[in-house]
Amino acid sequence: MPDIVLEYASEIRLAIGQTFVMVGISILAAVLVGLPLGTWLYLSRKGQLLSNRFVFSSLNLLVNTIRSFPFLLLVVFLIPFTRIIIGTAIGTAAATVPLAVIAIAHYSRLVEQSLLEVPKGVIEAAVSMGASTREVVVKFLFVEARSGLVLGLTTSIVSFISYSTIMGVVGGGGIGDFAVRYGYQQFQTELMLYMILIMVILVQLIQFAGTTVARLLDKR
Amino acid sequence: MILLQNVSKAFSGQPVIQSVALSIEQGEIHGIIGASGAGKSTLLRLMNLLERPDTGRVEFDGMDLTNLPNRQLRQTRQNIGMIFQDFNLVGNKTVEQNIGVSLELARVKKCEQADRIQECLRFVGLESFARKYPSELSGGQKQRVAIARALANRPRVLLCDEPTSSLDPSTTSEILRVLQDINQTLGVTIVLVSHEMQVIQSICNRVTIMADGQIETTIATEPAGITEITSDAGWFLTQLTERRDPHA
Ligand SMILES: Nc1ncnc2c1ncn2[C@@H]1O[C@H](COP(=O)(O)OP(=O)(O)OP(=O)(O)O)[C@@H](O)[C@H]1O
Ligand SMILES: [Mg+2]
């Protein structure tokens, strides 16, 4: 371990912990809210099971709007909202709010796209067998789209890591923030490079894991 | 068994089925033939309400399906099996899981499911394929799995939309033989949509001819029997298939 890294070991450990919390909450939000939202977006499309023009346009507009915000502006824009939910707009907990919002918007779009790749005939067969909409989603759509859903989540997680690096602006901490404050601002370029290295390794691992799981799940 | 009365259906203002009346009798194999775009698939999909008619009644066993609450409609659909040209199996489920899901939907007890799956697979001659995925099967085998899946809930009717159109001539004969067997040994009524005259002629008791969303006529026929389709006939079928959808 390089000396400079050892010197800041406890700060780095804290920063990594903060990144994991921020990315972890983002993943949770993506799966718990983004997956259902993306499914609804898909189902409300023209010609699908819950086809509804008003619902689809509204959801579509909402997701597009959130995703078109430059992320830094979204963070600032959401400050009053964050204060209501968390009680403060500063700190790692507060940082998870805008991250969760963008995570939901980001993943729901990828969910919609994965579901669109399921052949319509499979859904038709499911309906002809007497499946309810819920059963079509759980027993057919998610099963058939599962590798796409995993790959989408992988892509999303990599973006969440990137988003988490700018949460220093609201005192969220994390590896990115550490790299800027200790590495860049204190002219310890070496330290900054080590932080970037950590990020690169992290992203490689996640991508490798996601691709492998997706491949194992795909029997088509 | 199935009764369509004055049924009409339009897609975005374009009439596709125009006041059609048709009765499918218990125990028959009823063919529906017509040119591409005549509305054969739509007519078939009206029978299990995959497509809702704009006007008219769709009766199954004397029940008007169009008035049925959702839950009962879903239960009724379990009595009406359906198979398709593209098989529509779930690629990420094994053969037995594909059949099993249909039993789950019908709330068949877990302990009974394995037996039922075996029974269906035996019927279509695929006992040893239970653990395989659809991607490991030939087209004919996939259609057999689809048939097994449709039979799992012991339906009274089997709706078939061009079940042999993506199969070669000899596999076509095999599948037709399975359908005939289902009709004769299990007493399942069959509605068979096809644009191939030979397919219809070989096993149907009655044939409905469609054109432009209307029924031209329904005639009784003597099933000609499934002959090994000769290479000439094979060529003829290919011609028909190619003519069928130039846009596909
Ligand atoms: N969901 C839909 N939306 C709009 N138009 C449709 C839809 N389904 C069918 N049609 C139209 O209705 C007409 C009849 O279609 P249908 O699929 O019933 O014909 P078909 O006789 O089965 O033809 P083919 O032999 O090509 O399968 C066609 O013109 C088709 O374009
Ligand atoms: Mg058709």
Image (cartoon, coloured by chain):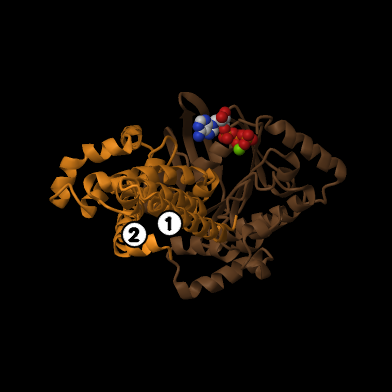
Chain colours: A orange, B brown
User: In the figure, is residue A88 to the left or right of A145?
Assistant: left
Q: Is residue B26 visible?
A: yes
The total of numbered circles placed on residues is 2
- Callout 2 crowding tier (Cα within 10 Å): few <14, some 14–19, many ≥20: many
Kind of residue at disc 2:
Ile
The local secondary structure at tag 1 comes to: helix
Residue A166, x across and y down, in percent:
31, 45
The local secondary structure at tag 2 comes to: helix
Pointer 2 indicates a residue of which chain?
A
Pointer 1 indicates a residue of which chain?
A
Residue A131, x across and y down, in percent:
43, 54
Residue A75 location, quadrant:
top left
User: In the figure, is residue A16 to the left or right of B124?
Assistant: left
Instruction: Identify the residue at the far top of this view.
Output: B13
The image quadrant where one finds the N terminus of chain A is bottom left
- Callout 1 crowding tier (Cα within 10 Å): few <14, some 14–19, many ≥20: some
**Numbered circle sitting on residue A114:** none
**Numbered circle sitting on residue A198:** 1
If the picture is divided into quarters, which one holds ligand 2? top right
Q: Is residue B217 visible?
A: no
Q: Is the distance from the Cβ of mark 2 to the nearest ligand 1 atom less than 8 Å?
A: no
- Comes first in the chain, label 1 or label 2: 2
Instruction: Assess whether mark 2 and mark 1 are in contact (beta carbons under 8 angstroms).
Output: yes
Mark 1 to mark 2 CA distance (whole Å) = 9 Å
Give the answer, above or below, for where A142 lies relative to B32.
Answer: below
Task: Identify residue for label 2.
Answer: A16
